[in-house]
Image (cartoon, rainbow, N blue to C red):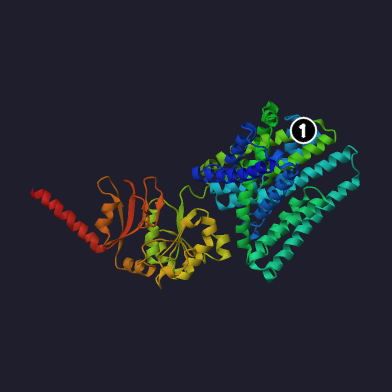
Amino acid sequence: MIMEFTLFVIAAVVVLGILSQWIAWRFRLPAIVIMSVVGLVVGPFLNIFNPQENFGNVFNPLISLAVAIILFEGSLSLDIREIKGFRHAIFRISTLGAFIAWIIGSLAAHFLAGLTLDVAFVIGGLFIVTGPTVILPLLRQSKLKERPAAILKWEGIVVDPFGALLALFALQVVFWTNNFISGTSLILFFGASILAALIGSIAGYFLGRLLELGFIPEFLKSPAVLSSVLLVFVLSDMIMHETGLLAVTAMGIVMANMHLTSIRDLIHFKENISVLLISSVFIMLTASLSSETLLEILNWRMFIFVLAMMFIVRPLSIWVSTIGVGLSVQERTLIGWIAPRGIVALTVSGYFAGVLTESGFEDGDIITALTLALVFATVLAHGFSISWLARKLGLQATEEAGVMIVGGTEFSAVLAEAIQSFNKPVLVLDRSWGALSPARQRGIETEVGDILSEHTEYHVDLTPYEILIAATEEDAYNALICQRFVPELGREHIYQTPIHIGDPSDYSKSLGGKMFIKQKYDIHTLNRHVEEGFMIRKTTLTEQYTFEHFLKDDSHSTIPLFAVDKDNNLIFSVMGNKSNFEQGTTIVSLTSPTRKIEKALEKANNTENISKE
């Protein structure tokens, strides 16, 4: 019976985690807030289960391994080319900014939260962390511009292991000053930290070489990397507690900057695992909290401490450390506000609380409640405010779902102009400067480059664009583009113009994107129609003039391109959309010039008949 209930808890944690992610996506809410609330409801509020009690001795090791994988996945995306132009800002924030946050945060913990100086400086080191478990979901939700998003991501991933190590260093100093350990232990601490970084770096380099030289078959690459991450983490943690986080971070950064041919597949594999792990770990941690711990949060000293951390410590550390690094006032304001704490702070604080309490520090048992208060306050405050603040400061890439059209043709320019008329961000991208001339003449934003090249990826901000239309004159290239962006945008947001060579049913449905338009209208046909004088026509549906009327009226001379509903949402594949469009929806079509003339004559005749009557 016990085993069956444990299985139920495992399944419930996974399902609730993914359900929380879906609710957050569906209603555009911060995922970490939903996960935290769900964990509290099923845990201390309703007492349905307590994962820490149910899993027993394997609870903490499971959490530690999950954090290691999440941190490695985040560091695997830290390509140095991404931060060209603002490396100095990231370095200053991760060093000077972290140091200032440690000192001032420790003093706040002592004078405001009432901790002794020894315990305050230990926990102050831990509180400099943000981490990928909380930062990355917020960045996905908020759609920040490229520079502030990159800075927050790099800070969260790089500072995460250093925060744990800083707290460990402070602990060693506290033990040394209280004569619990000798000075040799301090030297061993630095040696173990350096050794962990070397283990991670060397492991990452040799693993990358093995992948690149073909010593590991394709089907084993992701499992081999995953098992290597776990091995590196465990080996480093056996040398000294908490150094495993530093090792896996170093391992990921080294592999990210080796520019491996299979790096993108590894990132996608790790992203899928990380989503599952982040969801599950947040549910497990919050569901394992006791009612007593939650009650300890309701303390005015903790409340004052949390406010000081959010409104004084964080802004001050960022504003001082970013002096003269080229960041705007708006960017410094946003970065100085956003610093949610997450899984690493919660898990590592439990370790320090136990060690300090066992060593005779009476206020060591307050650490868990203090950490919990800071985590919940920052998750809620920053989760709900990041989009609003970014919009107010002009740092949100866009509120609207932008469209990226790949392929510079006459039709692409006409389509882009029609989409832009609904106040949607549009980008037309092509490998040829000349091919983009029609789009430039219409005032459309353009970029020259190959969408599949890494140069374009790191030098063109693609953040505002949630919808992609591959409309080049090469069908295979269109399919390749669609396949490349499926993991980032989702298959439901990727379209391509119809295949004009061969039978489309001969090709696998898993290749390419959704059909943008009717099969007979390939890109060559559409370009020819534009050259013949076909023009954009907008038809708004009413109660009297429905979508069925539109189809019957114009099917012989009009090519529906897309629709815009009354909430200004874009809808593509109009003819393949089985839903009955509501009144207020605008159908945007490419209409032949003869049809325009017919409509004009018909209108003129109707007017003449009315005047005769």
Residue 193: image location, x then y, percent: 80, 52
Question: How many numbered marks does the figure carry?
Answer: 1
Residue found at x 63% / y 47%? 278
Give how far across and how far down residue 124 sits, in percent: 74, 39
Does 179 sit above or below residue 75?
above
Q: What element carries label 1?
A: helix
x and y, in percent, of residue 264 in the image? 60, 62
In percent of the image, x 25 and y 46: which residue is there?
544
Neighbor class of circle 1 (other Cα within 10 Å; few <14, some 14-19, many 20+) is some
Amino acid of disc 1: Asp
Locate residue 145 relative to residue 589 in the image: left or right: right
User: Residue 430 location, x and y as percent?
Assistant: 47, 66
Q: Would you place residue 374 above or below residue 503 in this image?
A: above
Q: In which quarter of the image is residue 534?
A: bottom left
Residue, disc 1: 365
Q: Which residue is drawn at 48% across and 69% down?
A: 477
Asked if 406 appears above or below 540 in the picture, the reply is below
Quarter assignment of residue 225 = bottom right
Residue at the location (71% across, 34% down)? 370
Q: Quadrant of the N terminus?
A: top right
